[in-house]
Image: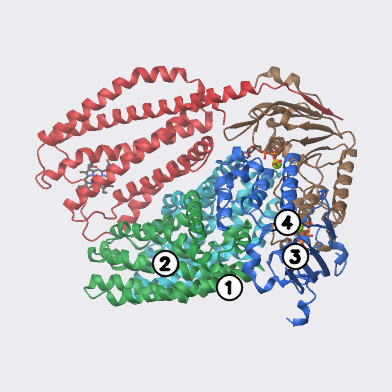
Chain colours: A cyan, B red, C brown, D green, E blue
């Protein structure tokens, strides 16, 4: 088996066995979405009006939270040091870890979203686009987040730092994600939004691993 | 990484000490004249009254906010690619100044908004991108100061500054789009009537003054950083002289 | 790096010339040189904080020396980091053992990352075969250490860098370790290790880090 | 200095020096609140309508997240074991840790809330009550969360599961908290809501440390 | 607990009778007894996984024995856990050192939790005085271990339970440890420790855990 696949497999196995950070994401997503009707009140029209926004914001927060520990556990137990000494380039390793992260967060998140959308009375016209936009957007979140996680490794105040670093970088994904859903509900074309989400992903795919690997290298020095 | 690299920017020190008084004096004079013109000479706006005078601080601050970020990202690129030590120091020194200008823009804008729109904040596209820019600065500053080894913070910061500059136009563009998608009901639109010459002059003078002010502070901050590094290198070389231990060889087969 | 420097490097083997290491603000050691021929072993000793771990990390390419060069067969190691990584095993104070994975899974992962190897045999050599299926969470301290050391045998590499490998090992495991080191040297490999206890090895050079202290700790 | 104060002081010092999980709370709070306008759109009336709910839900989520790791670091580095062998009863130690947690999360959270309320266009009438309800409600969140955190230490998988189990206990705090703010904006009396929040706190104060200490004891065995 | 049991307990000192320990599904040891008088020392030996750490944890009251009783001055330890906790120091494999706190802060915390003590002197005795102000993150492995051991001296306790205390210590620190143990015993204290290396102590009893293995490991 190639080293890349091996790394993806290990991260998946760890995530599934512990459930810890990864399953937390879905738990958090569900939990946060359930809390909103209690917070803003149960009126169906109001909920429907803000459903797309709530779903995307909580999905984004859920991804962000799990990212904080993307490299943390490996860093603490010496695995990151050992990994950096393996033949597989660090850039490829970052990509592998992002893929594993997305498989246990972005993917189940996209799968759960329609159910929660039902709860929040999202207009039926938006379901398909909700899932599509999450499927296209969450990989970008994982990739950008990896850069932040690598940068803040070993830093004091890692947690706040990561939130602060990621906030500006996540905003475009959020805007296009919500935009696509609202466009589809409003009866406009969703093409441009989804294309833009795809463009962000296409940009992040080569650039984020580069930046993250550079950050990891200097963290290990 | 190597502090010795910081130890010999003699040319910069010479150049900057020659420039510094001119920059400082120019900044003081221009801002003084500009403020005088803005507060006492420029006419009150027919719509906004005296409140319009905030503009003479607000607009230069807004321009400086993005200008400084661009400079910071440029310096970071130079630091990462050519490993030029002065570039690192320039980026580190510019960041708090840029954050300051951004905050000034936000605060003056907010004060102005309270008078003109009756609210401190609206999620207007332009306002929102300034807020996001402010967060970019905050993130950079937090990251740079989050490490014990100063070198590490600088390198992490350089990576972040570059990632940020790539993202900045994307944010601007997406925020514009977002704001037109949900057209706000009753929000005041910025950039009303074209500016009259009586206001343009003070504004231009203020902008120039702000630039010189920035240059002055930047030079001062860079010089302090360099002098601090020099002191540390002196201390370390003292230690190393102590350590001129007899080098021994260990050979095995 | 001035070209003149390279001529000083030994044509074969693993060597370091005039190395210095800085951790944070402090110069931990300076003026340290060593050279190892095929089959050679180097034992690092010295009091706590004298820089044994720091030197091993430099040798592994984790961090750059403040001064000096490390060379392999005459070429500076920093010129081709991937090649250097491919030729070494580094076992530090931290074991890089995942408590949730089983013993065999842990080892198979690390071996697989280096192209694969005989996991079962490596476990057997460190008397861990009986634990192959159990999660590492259940291992005792010495068993974890043995699992870390088993990585050395699961995939071959000419250069072994071991930071206090004997920590927590019982006497049987210590014998296993010494046998593994002897086999590695016989096959022409290189071993550098740090230790506070006696670890008898034929023809090993010893480097006491406190001789190169930049200032008394 | 008493052992209780010493423990509070140590946790505060760690939190302030690292910032890690605790300071992350405030970062997360600010971040989440700023993201909402991007999600639901910039209309001032809509934002004002849901401001109280958003602020309370994000405050709750922020507290929940930091609590998950309340005992984790001490557990991993052997400190929890050592602490359990100290003369100070474990119940008092839990209380001390909750106090420290609240001081670095609930308190700054309550202090930041008005600023965020400004951004979300909350009605000016609600500011005072917003702060008061957070000051009364967040200690309860810390206490209840400590029980969940202690329970999840022993369980191999299921940090999430246990957060979910704690959810029903959080919801009353959320309902009364938001209720108080909306009452004050609507011009009704806020007394009953705040009294109920106080009652929840009075109940959690003795019970939560008991339950958490019991859970910790069996996790250490 | 049947009253008849108590009559078997030694009237003074620290003793265990017929102890058995289960970890997970496995019975690690059984039928193990020991007794220590004031000033006594007990050295636990045995291969990896034989149950040394498990026994020390039982002695500390972390976990209950599967069978048997531990007693202090004739009374079962389980009858008054707070009193037992107050009389012991336990230093396990994990050091309970916070990387972010300074060396002095770390030690002052643990001493303060037990009512306070002389932190400066304890640091000096383990040659850590020079590091008092630096964050523990910067310590080398052996320095961390020394910091953990300094807790023994910072606040007094009659019973010391030490799991492989010599790990990573240089020879000076080893001497310091042995001097501390000797002083503790002279003052009438009790010391139980596990080790894989030689740790010469006058008149110490040795317990080899593999003699009590419930089934071969
Ligand atoms: C926190 C609130 C505000 C922020 C962040 C903000 C931001 C900015 C920025 C970034 C610019 C430069 C734009 C450019 O040159 O393209 C600018 C210019 C300007 N702002 Fe503001 N602004 C705020 C509030 C206000 C208010 C309340 C007013 C007046 C009612 C105002 C009036 C102007 C004017 C007249 C300009 C002049 C330049 C132009 O017309 O483009 N701003 N502001
Ligand atoms: N939490 C646990 N659950 C189940 N079994 C465990 C657990 N912890 C340890 N064990 C098992 O109990 C046995 C005894 O472990 P213990 O740590 O006491 O050994 P030890 O004598 O201290 O060994 P070492 O010399 O390696 O430190 C080992 O076989 C180990 O696998
Ligand atoms: N990240 C760091 N930043 C600054 N100084 C450090 C760092 N890590 C270690 N040091 C310091 O560097 C010195 C050398 O540490 P090192 O770990 O190499 O010692 P060592 O010889 O391996 O000691 P030990 O025998 O205790 O393992 C120590 O004085 C230590 O305090
Ligand atoms: Mg070491
Ligand atoms: Mg043990």
Along the viewing direction, whichever of D99 and E173 lies nearer the viewer: E173
Along the viewing direction, whichever of A44 and E15 lies nearer the viewer: E15
Q: Earlier in the sequence, mark 1 or mark 2?
A: 2
Residue at 58% of width from left, 72% of height from top?
D214
- The residue that disc 3 covers is E14
Nearer mark to the viewer, of 4 and 3: 4
- The residue that disc 1 covers is D214
x, y percent for residue D127? 27, 63
Can you say which quadrant of the picture contains the C terminus of chain C? top right
Q: Disc 1 to disc 2, how far (Cα)? A: 20 Å
Q: Is residue B24 visible?
A: yes
Q: Is residue B112 left or right of residue E185?
A: left
Q: Residues within 10 Å of mark 4 (few under 14, many from 20)?
A: some
Q: Disc 4 to disc 3, how far (Cα)? A: 12 Å
**Residue E188 - label:** 4
- The residue that disc 2 covers is D139
**Residue D128 - label:** none
Nearer mark to the viewer, of 3 and 2: 3
Label 3 marks a residue whose chain is: E
Q: Is residue A117 visible?
A: no
Nearer mark to the viewer, of 1 and 3: 3
Label 1 marks a residue whose chain is: D
Label 4 marks a residue whose chain is: E
x, y percent for residue C145? 77, 52
Label 2 marks a residue whose chain is: D
User: Disc count in the image?
Assistant: 4
């Amino acid at each position: 088996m190639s080293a890349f696949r091996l790394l993806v497999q290990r991260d998946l196995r760890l995530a599934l066995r512990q459930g810890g950070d990864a399953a937390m994401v879905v738990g958090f997503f569900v939990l946060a979405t359930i809390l909103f009707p209690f917070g803003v009140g149960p009126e169906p029209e109001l909920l429907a009006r803000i459903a797309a926004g709530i779903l995307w914001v909580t999905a984004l927060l859920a991804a962000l939270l799990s990212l904080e520990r993307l490299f943390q556990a490996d860093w603490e137990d010496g695995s990151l040091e050992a990994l950096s000494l393996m033949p597989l380039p660090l850039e490829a390793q970052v990509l592998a870890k992002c893929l594993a992260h997305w498989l246990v967060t972005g993917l189940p998140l996209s799968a759960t979203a329609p159910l929660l959308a039902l709860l929040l009375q999202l207009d039926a016209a938006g379901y398909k686009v909700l899932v599509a936009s999450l499927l296209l957007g969450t990989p970008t979140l994982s990739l950008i987040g990896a850069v932040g996680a690598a940068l803040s490794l070993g830093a004091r105040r890692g947690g706040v730092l990561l939130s602060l670093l990621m906030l500006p970088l996540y905003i475009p994904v959020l805007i296009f994600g919500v935009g696509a859903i609202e466009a589809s509900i409003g009866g406009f074309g969703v093409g441009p939004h989804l294309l833009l989400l795809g463009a962000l992903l296409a940009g992040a795919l080569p650039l984020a691993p580069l930046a993250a690997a550079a950050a990891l290298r200097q963290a290990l020095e | 990484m190597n502090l010795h690299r910081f130890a010999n920017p003699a040319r910069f020190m010479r150049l900057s000490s020659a420039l510094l008084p001119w920059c400082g004096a120019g900044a003081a004079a221009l801002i003084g004249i500009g403020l005088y013109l803005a507060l006492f000479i420029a006419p009150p706006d027919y719509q906004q009254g005296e409140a319009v005078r905030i503009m003479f601080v607000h607009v230069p601050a807004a321009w400086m906010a993005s200008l400084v970020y661009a400079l910071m990202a440029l310096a970071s690129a130079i630091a990462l690619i050519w490993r030029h030590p002065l570039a690192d120091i320039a980026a580190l020194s510019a960041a708090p100044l840029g954050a300051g200008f951004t905050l000034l823009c936000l605060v003056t804008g907010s004060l102005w908004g309270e008078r003109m729109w009756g609210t401190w904040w609206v999620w207007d596209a332009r306002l929102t991108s300034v807020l996001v820019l402010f967060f970019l600065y905050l993130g950079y500053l937090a990251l740079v100061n989050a490490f014990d080894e100063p070198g590490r913070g600088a390198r992490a910061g350089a990576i972040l500054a570059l990632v940020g500059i790539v993202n900045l136009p994307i944010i601007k563009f997406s925020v514009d789009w977002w704001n037109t998608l949900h057209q706000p009901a009753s929000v005041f639109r910025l950039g009303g009537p074209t500016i009259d010459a009586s206001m343009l002059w003070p504004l231009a003078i203020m902008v120039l003054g702000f630039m010189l002010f920035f240059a002055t502070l930047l030079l001062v901050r860079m010089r302090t950083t360099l002098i601090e590094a020099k002191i540390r290198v002196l201390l370390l070389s003292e230690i190393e002289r102590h350590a001129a231990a007899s080098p021994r060889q260990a050979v095995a087969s | 790096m001035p070209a003149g420097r390279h001529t000083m490097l030994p044509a074969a083997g693993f060597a370091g010339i005039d190395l210095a290491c800085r951790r944070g603000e402090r110069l931990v050691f300076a003026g340290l040189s060593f050279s190892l021929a095929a089959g050679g072993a180097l034992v690092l000793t010295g009091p706590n904080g004298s820089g044994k771990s720091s030197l091993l990390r430099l040798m592994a390419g984790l961090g750059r020396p403040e001064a000096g060069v490390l060379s392999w067969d005459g070429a500076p190691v920093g010129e081709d980091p991937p090649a250097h990584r491919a030729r070494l095993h580094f076992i530090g104070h931290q074991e890089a053992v995942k408590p949730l994975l089983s013993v065999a899974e842990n080892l198979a992962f690390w071996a697989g990352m280096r192209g694969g190897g005989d996991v079962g045999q490596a476990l057997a050599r460190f008397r861990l075969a009986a634990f192959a299926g159990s999660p590492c969470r259940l291992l005792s301290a010495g068993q974890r250490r043995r699992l870390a050391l088993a990585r050395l045998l699961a995939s071959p590499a000419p250069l072994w860098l071991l930071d206090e490998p004997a920590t927590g090992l019982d006497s049987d495991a210590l014998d296993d370790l010494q046998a593994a080191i002897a086999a590695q040297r016989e096959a022409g490999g290189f071993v550098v290790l740090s230790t506070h206890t006696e670890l008898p090895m034929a023809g090993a050079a010893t480097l006491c880090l406190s001789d190169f202290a930049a200032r008394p700790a």
